[in-house]
Structure formats: structure tokens, C-alpha cells
Image: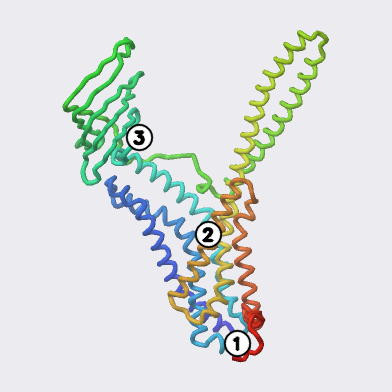
């Protein structure tokens, strides 16, 4: 039996690494499309480019490994079924449960590795990737000028251009709000211009043509100056041509491990409890004050106090609104962190689910080719990912629990896989079409 188990596992190794390579390559190509212009425009060193891809490779592997498990299971069992080896094994008294056992136990080891990877490696990689991408965006920020969108990447300057030539440094329809070392900003408009960096690589040179400068005298605000020019050159120092590495203590939800996120959820729970107690205290104290003010005999005094009560109620309403918003914000953040906690377990657990659903489907497909494995894998992974994304959105808004959001796909697909395995073990058809006979008249059924 050990020889048989080793043989089945060997059938999975090749398709697993092949599927892992193909899926990771697809994710890398999709990532390259997003960052290619950024990398080319920034003039990054090869080492920085390798770091960008290396750090983002972590989240790619977190997705591609479970999908590679599904590909390998479909292709391995499909090949065994195509060569009638599954039939021979069953004829020798080996049940389908025993055939699925080796890849199932292997998937448990892969899932445990992914849990460690998602909790220890992935958060650090995401954190360093965010810092690096932030630094890259601040390197030569003017190369990110987009038509009809204000650029605020250079401190002290707001720049708007109507047209940018992607093949040169020429720009048209320029509006610049200069607030650098000024209390009252000055406005510079120009019909056209050119953008380049000085030889030091850190000073931005803006050559403007046919424009005007509008500014107010800061010492005498009543005085207004309007200057026209044919050519004007602006030198902006420290425009960020050098890539300077920084450190950031802030971490988003995908940059934290499980311990950090549970600590955050504990804080959110405490904040919600404080907001509830504050709301109760505001309501209790306001009611007692209102009742004490109403007990007055004179109608004139009562009218004055009622107006005071109405004004006081508006203030109380604002206080209650603030507390309500505080509770809703903390609840959303709490759900967000809980979703990420469950995600660190649910995605690795998908390895087990994909083995359960992939083995019987591979046998039923009768072929272990790339087309069958890739097609079925893509279909189930799209379904799984749709459940995951939709569940995350619903959980963040508080419509469903974080557990249900992250585990519903595993439960549904796993239950379907168990059902197919049981039906396949009993040698029964997965879908019965006998009900269609009732739609055909008896005299035509034998035809």
C-alpha cells in the first residue's frame, strides 16, 4: 500500500509545480501591466525592481498554491483514470477513499505551511511592499502628471495640466498654485511648457511659455500684481528624484499577523462598549434635566425653558450622532480585522477542499490534459474567489459574520466534493436523467 501511495503522490508533484509556475506567471504578468509605466518612468535600479517583484510575490504565492493543488489533483487523477489505472486499483480492492488519502494528507501539510506563511511572511512582505511603493511614487513625482488632475506630490505646489505628451517632456494648459514659503499663494498659468530634472537629479526645472503670474503683496494685501511673460523658468528643489528609504510604524490590516489583529479587535470592542455607555449616560442625564425644567408654574417661564430645552436637545442629538458614528466605525474596523483573521485560515484550508472536489472530478473527466485541468481549476477558483470577495464586502458592512464570509466557499465546495466522492464510491451516477423519460410518450421511449 505504501508503494501505491508514493506512486499517487508522484503523479501530483509534476502537475503541482507546473500549475504553480503557470498561475504565478499569470499573476506576475498582470502585476507587470499595472506597474510597468511606473517602473520605466521612475528610472529605478534593477535591484529596486527585483525588490518590488520579490515582495509582491508573497501574495501571489498565497493565491497560486491552493490553485496549484486543484490543478495537480485534477490532472493526476485524470491521467490515472484515462489509462484505466483507477479501474485497476478499484478492481484490486482499493477504494476511492484510499486513493484520495495520500494527496489529502499532503494538502494538510501544505495548508499548515500556508497558515504559517500567511501569518509570518505575508504581513511583513505586504508592509515592506507598501513602504517601497510609497517611496517609488515620491521619486520624480512630476512624471506622474495626468491630464486634468491636480498633482499635489510636490510639497507646496498644486499643479494642473490639460495635456501631457507621453513621448516627451512637453505639457500644455498649465496652472500652478505656488504655496511654498508663502502665506498667500500665487497663481501661475501658461499655455505650454517643458519638464526636466537638473543634473543633480533632485531639482525640477519647469520652463513655461506664454503665461501670466498673479499674486498679492503679503505685506500689503490690497496690492495685486499681474505679470505677463513669454518665457519663465521655475526651479523646484527637493522634487524627489532620489529614492530615500523610510520606516513606517503604521500597519494596515493585511500587514498584521493574527496576534496584532486580535489586539486591534479587542480595542474596537472596548471602544464600542465605551460609546454605548456614553450614549446611555447622555440620554439619562438629558431626560432628568428636561423633567426638572418642565416643573414650572408660570407660562412665560415655561415658554422660555421649552425653547432652551429644544436648543439643548439639538446639542444632545449631535452628541448622540457622534457616538453612533463612533460605534459604527469601530464595528466596521472590527469586522474588517476579523475577516482578515479568518482569511489566514480559510484560504489554506482551500487546499483540502480542492483535493476533495478535484479527485472525483478528475476521474469523471477521464483525461488529465492541461485544458481540462486548467478549465476546471479556473472555474472553481473563480467561484471560490467570488464567494470570498462578496463575503468580505458583506462582512465589512456587517450584513454577515466574518466566519460565514470567509468559510462559506469552503463549506459549499467541500460538501459538494464529499457528495461526489460518496456517489462515485457507490458507482452511482452523479446526475440522474431518468425524470426526462416522463416527458416522452411511452410509444416513443423504445425508439
Could you tell me if residue 97 is visible in this image?
no
The numbered mark, 1 or 2, whose residue comes first in the sequence reads 1
The image quarter in which residue 227 lies:
top left
Q: Is 199 drawn above or below residue 426 in the view shown?
A: above
Q: Where is residue 181 in the image (x, y as percent from the top left)?
A: 33, 21
Residue designated by label 2: 385
Q: Where is residue 66 in the image (x, y as percent from the top left)?
A: 51, 65
Q: Where is residue 27 in the image (x, y as percent from the top left)?
A: 41, 60
Label 2: which secondary element: helix
Q: Position of residue 326 (x, y in %)?
A: 62, 34
Q: Residues within 10 Å of mark 3 (few under 14, many from 20)?
A: some
Name the quarter where the C terminus is drawn.
bottom right
Residue designated by label 1: 90
Could you tell me if residue 381 is visible in this image?
yes
Residue designated by label 3: 150
Gap between marks 1 and 2 measured at Cα? 35 Å
Label 3: which secondary element: loop
In the rendered structure, the answer to whether residue 69 lies left or right of residue 140 reads right
Q: Nearer the viewer, mark 1 or mark 3?
A: 3
The numbered mark, 1 or 3, whose residue comes first in the sequence reads 1
Q: Is 378 drawn above or below residue 363 in the view shown?
A: above
In the rendered structure, the answer to whether residue 101 lies left or right of residue 227 reads right
Instruction: Name the residue: 62% across, 64% down.
Output: 412
Q: Tell which of 402 and 134 is nearer to you.
A: 402
Q: Which of marks 1 and 2 is in front?
A: 2
Name the quarter where the N terminus is drawn.
bottom right
Q: Residues within 10 Å of mark 1 (few under 14, many from 20)?
A: some
Gap between marks 2 and 3 measured at Cα? 36 Å
Q: Is 140 drawn above or below residue 338 in the view shown?
A: above
Label 1: which secondary element: helix
The numbered mark, 2 or 3, whose residue comes first in the sequence reads 3
Amino acid at each position: 500500500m505504501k508503494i501505491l501511495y508514493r506512486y499517487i503522490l508522484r503523479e501530483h508533484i509534476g502537475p503541482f509545480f507546473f500549475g504553480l509556475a503557470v498561475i504565478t506567471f499569470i499573476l506576475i504578468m498582470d502585476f507587470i501591466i499595472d506597474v510597468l509605466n511606473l517602473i520605466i518612468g521612475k528610472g529605478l535600479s534593477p535591484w529596486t525592481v527585483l525588490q518590488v517583484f520579490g515582495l509582491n510575490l508573497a501574495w501571489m504565492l498565497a493565491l497560486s498554491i491552493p490553485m496549484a493543488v486543484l490543478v495537480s489533483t485534477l490532472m493526476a487523477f485524470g491521467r490515472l483514470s484515462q489509462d484505466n489505472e483507477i479501474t485497476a486499483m478499484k478492481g484490486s480492492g482499493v477504494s476511492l477513499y484510499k486513493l484520495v488519502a495520500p494527496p489529502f494528507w499532503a494538502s494538510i501539510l501544505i495548508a499548515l505551511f500556508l497558515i504559517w506563511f500567511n501569518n509570518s511572511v505575508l504581513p511583513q512582505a505586504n508592509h515592506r511592499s507598501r513602504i517601497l511603493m510609497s517611496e517609488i511614487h515620491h521619486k520624480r513625482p512630476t512624471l506622474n502628471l495626468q491630464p486634468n488632475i491636480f498633482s499635489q506630490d510636490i510639497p507646496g505646489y498644486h499643479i494642473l495640466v490639460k495635456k501631457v505628451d507621453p513621448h516627451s517632456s512637453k505639457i500644455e494648459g498649465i496652472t500652478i498654485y505656488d504655496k511654498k514659503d508663502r502665506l498667500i499663494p500665487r497663481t501661475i498659468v501658461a499655455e505650454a511648457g517643458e519638464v526636466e530634472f537638473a543634473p543633480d537629479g533632485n531639482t525640477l526645472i519647469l520652463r513655461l511659455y506664454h503665461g501670466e503670474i498673479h499674486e498679492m503683496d503679503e505685506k500689503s494685501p490690497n496690492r495685486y500684481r499681474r505679470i505677463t511673460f513669454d518665457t519663465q523658468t521655475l526651479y523646484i528643489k527637493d522634487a524627489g528624484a532620489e529614492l530615500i528609504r523610510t520606516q513606517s510604524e503604521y500597519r494596515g490590516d493585511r500587514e498584521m499577523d493574527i496576534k496584532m489583529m486580535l489586539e486591534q479587535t479587542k480595542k474596537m470592542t472596548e471602544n464600542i462598549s465605551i460609546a454605548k455607555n456614553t450614549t446611555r449616560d447622555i440620554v439619562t442625564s438629558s431626560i432628568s434635566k428636561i423633567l426638572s425644567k418642565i416643573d414650572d408654574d408660570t407660562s412665560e417661564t415655561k415658554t422660555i425653558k421649552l425653547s432652551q430645552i429644544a436648543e439643548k436637545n439639538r446639542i444632545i442629538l449631535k452628541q448622540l450622532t457622534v457616538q453612533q458614528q463612533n460605534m459604527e466605525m469601530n464595528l466596521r474596523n472590527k469586522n474588517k480585522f476579523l475577516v482578515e483573521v479568518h482569511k489566514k485560515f480559510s484560504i489554506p484550508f482551500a487546499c483540502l477542499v480542492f483535493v476533495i472536489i478535484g479527485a472525483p472530478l478528475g476521474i469523471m473527466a477521464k483525461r488529465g490534459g492541461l485544458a481540462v485541468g486548467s478549465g476546471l481549476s479556473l472555474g472553481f477558483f473563480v467561484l471560490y474567489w467570488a464567494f470570498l470577495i462578496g463575503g468580505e464586502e458583506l462582512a465589512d458592512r456587517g450584513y454577515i459574520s466574518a466566519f460565514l464570509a470567509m468559510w462559506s466557499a469552503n463549506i459549499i465546495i467541500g460538501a459538494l466534493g464529499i457528495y461526489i466522492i460518496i456517489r462515485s464510491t457507490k458507482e452511482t451516477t452523479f446526475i440522474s436523467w431518468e425524470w426526462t423519460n416522463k416527458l416522452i410518450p411511452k410509444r416513443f421511449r423504445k425508439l
